[in-house]
Image (spheres, grey):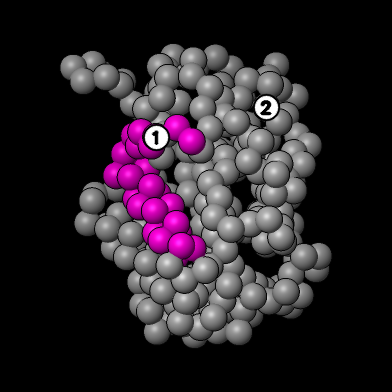
């Protein structure tokens, strides 16, 4: 497989490159705005994710694309519009024009961040974004659905939880996605013969988890790690009501 990873220099991209290198992908092409030191069987394309010509160059000849490039936190709407919305369109359009048949889109758990921590939800529940960032990821999911239905592209949208080497706060006990499980989930999305269009939550087998992980299992994702392993080491933090975390409140209240 020849694979493009956009936003490859970021935190998630770095973990994923380590997991996929030398196994699933025969050659990995990396697209980022900033310079990246390539490893074995890697090549780098530098450029803006919103530049369709650059993305076409990067995705040309690839069998699949993992689209990670985005502003990964809340920001002014203009910045979100430029990078997360226009950039995601450029990736899907470049994939269509260059004949890349499969895209794995890094969505976010913040697409449903305004559900209560007492709710148990899955991809069938309506979106309840907690930010412009979360709303931009819902747009990306909708765009993926369009490119699947209209152009026959295989698209997986992964609502990534907290992709970290280890959980560091109480919320992560529900949302953690270990580096190993991140690799296993993305690999399943890249290789599953069952994939048409799918939205799956990206989390490990966390005892305290909020999300239905069965849609990922149907694609071949077998989760192995559990944040509960680290629970005794985590100090209590601020209380929170919503799955998005302590920064999100009801109108008229403060964090």
Which of disc 1 and disc 2 is earlier in sequence? Answer: 1
Q: Which one is in front in this view, the residue at disc 2 or the one at disc 1?
A: 1
Relative to 164, residue 69 above or below: below
Magenta span: chief secondary structure: helix
Image-quadrant location for residue 145: bottom left
- Label 1, secondary structure: give it: loop
Q: Is residue 130 left or right of residue 208?
A: left
* Residue drawn at (40%, 49%) of the image: 137
Q: Rounded to the nearest whole Å, what is the CA distance between mark 2 and mark 1?
A: 23 Å
Q: Quadrant of residue 162?
A: top right
Write the residue at 64% across / 35% down: 213
The residues colored magenta run: 124-149
Viewport quadrant of the N terminus:
bottom right
Q: Residue at x 35, y 52 (%)?
A: 139
Residue 169 sits above or below residue 82 on the image:
above
Label 1 crowd (10 A; few <14 / some 14-19 / many >=20):
few
Q: Is residue 222 magenta?
A: no
Q: Quadrant of residue 187?
A: bottom right
Tag of residue 206: 2
Q: Which residue is mark 1?
A: 126
Which residue is outermost to the left?
252
Horizontal arrangement in the rendering, residue 149 relative to residue 103 (left or right): left
**Coordinates of residue 134 in the picture (x, y in percent):** 37, 43
For mark 2, does the 10 Å Cα neighbourhood hold few (<14), some (14 to 19), or many (20 or more) residues?
A: many
């Amino acid at each position: 497989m020849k694979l493009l990873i956009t936003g490859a220099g970021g935190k998630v991209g770095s973990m994923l490159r380590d997991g996929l290198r030398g196994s699933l992908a025969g050659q990995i092409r990396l697209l980022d705005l900033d310079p990246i030191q390539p490893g074995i069987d890697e090549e780098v394309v530098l450029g803006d994710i919103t530049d369709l010509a650059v993305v076409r160059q990067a995705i040309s000849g690839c069998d699949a694309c993992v689209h990670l490039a985005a502003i990964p936190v809340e920001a002014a709407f203009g910045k979100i519009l430029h990078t997360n919305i226009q950039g995601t369109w450029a990736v899907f359009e470049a994939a269509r024009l260059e004949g890349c048949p499969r895209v794995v889109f890094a969505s976010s758990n913040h697409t449903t961040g305004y559900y209560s921590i007492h709710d148990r939800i899955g991809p069938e529940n309506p979106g309840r974004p907690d930010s412009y960032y979360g709303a931009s990821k819902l747009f990306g999911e909708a765009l993926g659905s369009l490119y699947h239905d209209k152009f026959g592209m295989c698209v997986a949208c992964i609502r990534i939880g907290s992709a970290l080497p280890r959980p560091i706060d109480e919320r992560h006990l529900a949302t953690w996605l270990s580096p190993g499980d991140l690799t296993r989930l993305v690999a399943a999305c890249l290789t599953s013969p069952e994939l048409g269009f799918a939205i799956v939550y990206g989390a490990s087998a966390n005892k305290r988890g909020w999300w239905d992980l069965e849609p990922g299992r149907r694609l071949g994702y077998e989760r192995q790690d559990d944040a509960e392993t680290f629970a005794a080491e985590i100090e209590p933090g601020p209380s929170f009501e919503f799955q998005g975390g302590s920064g999100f409140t009801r109108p008229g209240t403060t964090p």
